[in-house]
Amino acid sequence: MDPAQTVTKYIRYEYDSTAAYGILQGETVHEIQGDLFGSRGLTGKQHALADIRLLYPCVPPKILAVGRNYKSHLGTRPQPVNPEMFYKPTSALQHPGEPIVIPPEAQNVHYEGELVLVIGRQARNVSPAEAPACVFGVTCGNDISERDWQNGAQKDLQWWRAKGSDTFAPLGPAIVTGLDYGNLLLRTRLNGEVVQEQSTSDLIFDCPTVVSWISRWVTLYPGDLIYTGTPQTTRKMNPGDVVEVEIEGVGVLRNRVE
């Protein structure tokens, strides 16, 4: 991303039962109209942040995610040769501040704090050098995972429910442009305790590599999301817990567990 680009925070929000996009400046929301990923402009309407309800910051056509993308998360497993990709359904998205709901029969649900890329232009068979121009901005994500359904003795053939159950993809609070997303500090807190902390510079496959790799087979479109992987270890969440994913320059994604 161009280091000279202005840092801007874009949000999607609800006010008076209507959803809209806006630019967040401090505690003030400036409503915008038009295409978030194309031509857009200010409407002149403003709201106090305290008066609106934050929504996940875009409505993606699809969600992809990278597994095993920090050395600190691999444990004894070998380092992948290429990015290991999987899908999460868009129905798994959850708004900032809304609950992560543990499904019936789930026994081992973990947090995974992650940097999420938001695609801004169509990308098909792009090179790593071309990939940064296809990224609109970044946000915080939590790749919620049921470890027994993912890796247990009775694991599913695919991770359709282990990582795709309803509310298993919290996202937000803002899409931020103009950051050096290759060098941002990521922290996850569980009930106020820091449980993950690492720089995105430690990704095994950096963001341009991941975008380029995906685009060789799957065309990326504006609004598509890529969860880029989680660092270090994770542990079980329980009802009543509060999990926070904070990324430098982006903000804090906070969700309680039910």
Image: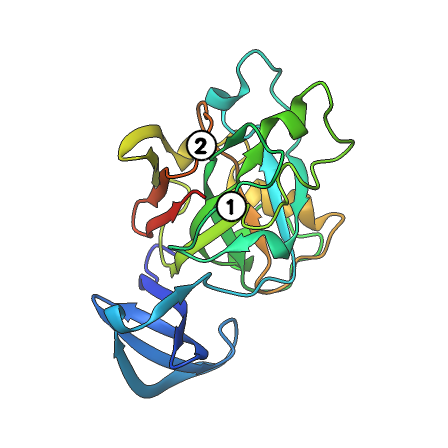
- Residue ID for mark 1: 101
Q: How many residues crowd mark 2 within 10 Å: few (<14), some (14–19), many (20+)?
A: many
Mark 2 falls on what kind of element? loop
Count up the numbered dots. 2
Residue found at the very far top of the displayed protein: 76
Q: Which mark is residue 237?
A: 2
Mark 1 falls on what kind of element? loop
Q: Is residue 84 above or below residue 65?
A: above
Q: How many residues crowd mark 1 within 10 Å: few (<14), some (14–19), many (20+)?
A: some
Residue 49 at x, y = what percent? 26, 69
Q: Is residue 145 above or below residue 168?
A: above
Quadrant in which the N terminus appears: bottom left
Question: Which sits in the foreground, 20 or 238?
Answer: 238
Residue found at the very far left of the displayed protein: 26
Q: Does residue 132 show up?
A: yes
Q: Is residue 254 left or right of residue 137?
A: left
Three-letter amino acid code at the position of disc 2: Met
Question: Which sits in the foreground, 47 or 232?
Answer: 47
Question: Which sits in the foreground, 45 or 168?
Answer: 168
Quadrant in which the C terminus appears: top left
Q: Is residue 90 above or below residue 192?
A: below
The quarter of the displayed image where residue 42 is located: bottom left
Q: Is residue 148 left or right of residue 240?
A: right
Mark 2 or mark 1: which comes first in sequence? 1
Q: Is residue 130 above or below residue 21?
A: above
Task: Name the residue located 52 percent from the left edge and 36 percent from the top edge.
Answer: 229
Q: Is residue 27 left or right of residue 10?
A: left
Task: Name the residue located 48 percent from the left edge and 35 percent from the top edge.
Answer: 112
Three-letter amino acid code at the position of disc 1: Val
